[in-house]
């Protein structure tokens, strides 16, 4: 159907393309630890060792009824529904930070169940709806 | 069919098209903005900042779509030597870059009140930034090698290699844990955006698509005129 030259160019291009795809894949694979933005409480549980001077991010859901405000400190529990971790933080939290919502805490791990956050980011999920619809959904629960 | 893409034939068409595209764009963007800014409801949790989405999401889609189009055209240029695609690919790039930057900037403006940060080096945002860099390299290569014989080969290779980034952007939110939320609009699964918010989103997407077609036509006509002035009938 196509001439010999077209086939040759196609072959050459696919070859280059495949090599680059493979190298990108290998680079991303080896950098996975840095590509993920946060780790889950379960992954913390499985960490080989606790390095309390390494800044890292933990993400998950804020467990219901665990947010406590003390004088200058706020404490809550991040859960991935398998494991949990206690977090303390002092400072302002984003507007979307609330119980049952996603959160990413950046800071230092004190031990496997205690995390000292220096920064709190709220994670928004993929659901968008007007307040009335949300109320209707809650009512139907 | 490809004969119709010959520059001297297509110019009679593309030189008239912009005014019609512009008129349609003005109508669609007017309706779209009224829908997005006034009629559509606020979100249950982010309230009015949801309206940023009506600019952010269409811009991101169009920048991705434009780059995919450039990559497919570039593939045809290299493999099948379809010369008339060269100027089309070249003329698509500026609008794509503009919408890429709009997506990054509006994302940042949305991120501050929602996440609590302007910028995060998560996989989605970083790969979008890499796409912007590819656009810039692509456009720069056209400038640098302007009169070179091999310019279309160099730029096409940049576009084809940059296309590897497209699926990475699309699936970054599924492959890795990211701050950016996963896709709300899914072709095969349930969409998680309420229907009252889909209408402005669709209208704004149409408006931005028309605008990028307009910019493309203006750029393409300029390129065609440049060739005519050089006294060349063909490329």
Image (cartoon, coloured by chain):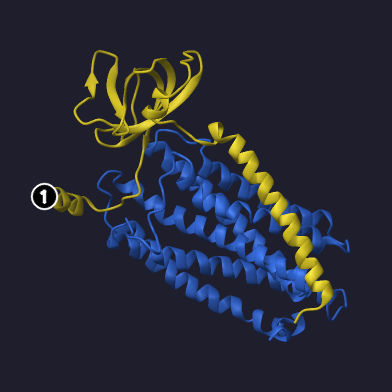
Chain colours: A yellow, B blue
Residue B72, placed above or below residue A48? below
Where residue B99 appears, as percent x and y from the top left, is 55, 56
Q: Residue at x 76, y 64 (%)?
A: A11
Residue B213, placed above or below residue B52? below
Can you identify the residue that label 1 sits on? A139
Residue A104 in view: no
Image quadrant holding the C terminus of chain B, namely: bottom right
Q: Residue at x 22, y 20 (%)?
A: A68
Q: Residue at x 32, y 56 (%)?
A: B193
Question: In the shown orientation, is residue B160 left or right of residue B53?
Answer: right
Where residue B131 appears, as percent x and y from the top left, is 61, 50
Q: Residue at x 60, y 79 (%)?
A: B17
Crowdedness near tag 1: few (<14), some (14–19) or many (≥20) residues, C-alpha within 10 Å:
few
Near-viewer residue (B103 or B18): B103
Residue A134 in view: yes
Where residue B13 appears, as percent x and y from the top left, is 65, 84
Q: Quadrant of residue A124?
A: top left
Chain under callout 1: A
Residue A98, placed above or below residue A4? above
């Amino acid at each position: 159907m196509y001439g010999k030259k077209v086939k040759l160019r196609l072959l050459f291009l696919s070859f280059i393309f495949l090599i680059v795809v493979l190298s990108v894949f290998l680079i991303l694979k080896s950098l996975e630890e840095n590509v993920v933005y946060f780790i889950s409480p379960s992954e913390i549980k499985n960490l080989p060792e606790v390095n309390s001077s390494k800044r890292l991010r933990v993400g998950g859901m804020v467990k219901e009824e665990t947010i406590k405000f003390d004088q200058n400190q706020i404490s809550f529990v991040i859960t991935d529904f398998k494991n949990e971790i206690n977090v303390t933080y002092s400072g302002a939290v984003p507007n979307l930070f609330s119980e049952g919502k996603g959160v990413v805490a950046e800071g230092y791990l004190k031990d496997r169940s205690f995390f000292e956050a220096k920064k709190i980011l709220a994670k928004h999920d993929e659901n968008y709806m007007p307040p009335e619809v949300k109320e209707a959904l809650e009512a139907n629960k | 069919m490809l004969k119709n893409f010959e520059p001297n034939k297509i110019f009679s068409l593309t030189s008239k098209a912009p005014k019609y595209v512009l008129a349609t764009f003005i109508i669609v963007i007017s309706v779209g903005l009224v829908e997005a800014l006034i009629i559509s409801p606020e979100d249950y949790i982010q309230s009015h900042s949801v309206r940023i989405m009506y600019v952010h999401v269409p811009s991101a889609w169009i920048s991705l779509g434009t780059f995919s189009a450039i990559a497919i055209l570039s593939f045809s240029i290299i493999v099948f030597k379809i010369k008339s695609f060269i100027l089309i690919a070249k003329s698509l790039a500026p609008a794509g870059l503009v919408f890429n930057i709009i997506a990054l900037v509006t994302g940042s403006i949305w991120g501050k009140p929602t996440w609590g940060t302007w910028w995060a080096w998560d996989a989605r945002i970083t790969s979008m930034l890499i796409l912007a860099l590819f656009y810039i390299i692509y456009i720069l290569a056209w400038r640098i090698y302007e009169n070179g014989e091999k310019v279309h080969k160099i730029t096409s290779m940049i576009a084809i290699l940059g296309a590897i980034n497209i699926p990475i952007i699309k699936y970054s939110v599924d492959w890795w844990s990211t701050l950016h939320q996963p896709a709300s609009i899914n072709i095969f699964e349930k969409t998680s955006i309420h229907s009252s918010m889909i209408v402005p989103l669709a209208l704004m997407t149409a408006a931005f698509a028309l605008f990028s077609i307009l910019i493309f036509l203006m750029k393409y006509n300029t390129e065609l005129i440049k060739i005519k002035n050089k006294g060349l009938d063909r490329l």
